[in-house]
Image: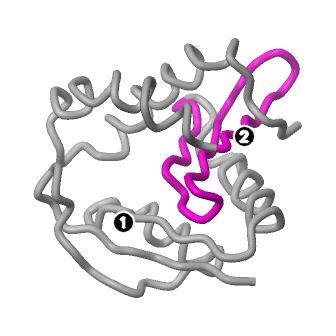
């Protein structure tokens, strides 16, 4: 089931974010992600519309939309990746929001292929200001 997150979900969301982001971005140091933990928890999640994928009582993944147009996060618990949960979350938000964009690291090849299969197109390549790594800006419109 996909539902809007609530305040009680934040610790589980952040646990998933930390484990998944480190795994997905092995080309960036763990310390970079650990140093960004509080920023994500206290700044980005509160300003986002965040939806969780819940199976029974367990949150297995989440997606966060900033300003009703930018996918700031899509992360799945590392134990449940490649089971279609990310696709279900993405399908859910592409029905809720007309035009979406996202930034994905160029070196995160699996994610680039995933978003491309879901109809997102690369519109720009740039350097991420915080990390210094190359990223793509991808857009989707329905």
In the image: residue 108, left or right of residue 89 = left
Q: Nearer the viewer, residue 129 or 120?
A: 129
What is the crowding at mark 1: few (fewer than 14 residues within 10 Å), some, or many (at least 20)? few
In terms of sequence position, does the residue under pointer 1 or pointer 2 come before the other? Answer: 2
Above or below for 39 versus 141: above
Image quadrant where one finds the C terminus: bottom right
Mark 2 lies on residue: 51
Q: Nearer the viewer, residue 50 or 105?
A: 50
Image quadrant in which you'd find residue 77: top right
Mark 1 lies on residue: 109
State whether the magenta stretch is mostly helix, strand or loop. strand
Above or below for 65 versus 125: above
Above or below for 11 versus 46: above
In the image: residue 130, left or right of residue 72 = left
Q: Nearer the viewer, residue 39 or 120?
A: 39
Q: Percent from the top left, x then y, of residue 106?
A: 28, 68
Magenta residues span 49-78
What is the crowding at mark 2: few (fewer than 14 residues within 10 Å), some, or many (at least 20)? many
Q: Does the magenta-highlighted stretch encompass residue 60?
A: yes
Compute the Cα span from label 1 to label 2.
24 Å
In the image: residue 4, left or right of residue 103 = right
Label 1 element class:
helix
Counting the numbered discs, the total is: 2
Residue drawn where x is 26% and y is 32% of the image = 33
Image quadrant in which you'd find residue 43: top left
Label 2 element class:
strand
Residue drawn where x is 46% and y is 38% of the image = 44
């Amino acid at each position: 089931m996909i539902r809007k997150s609530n305040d009680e979900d934040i610790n589980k969301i952040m646990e998933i974010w930390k484990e998944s982001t480190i795994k997905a971005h092995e080309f960036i140091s763990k310390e970079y992600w650990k140093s960004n933990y509080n920023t994500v928890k206290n700044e980005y999640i509160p300003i986002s519309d965040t939806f969780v994928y819940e199976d029974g009582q367990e949150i297995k993944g989440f997606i966060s939309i900033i300003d009703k147009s930018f996918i700031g996060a899509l992360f799945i618990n590392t134990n449940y990746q490649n089971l279609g949960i990310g696709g279900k979350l993405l399908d859910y938000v592409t029905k809720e929001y007309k035009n979406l964009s996202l930034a994905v690291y160029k070196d995160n090849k699996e994610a680039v292929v995933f978003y491309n299969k879901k109809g997102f197109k690369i519109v720009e390549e740039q350097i991420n200001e915080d990390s210094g790594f190359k990223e793509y800006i991808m857009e989707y419109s329905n």
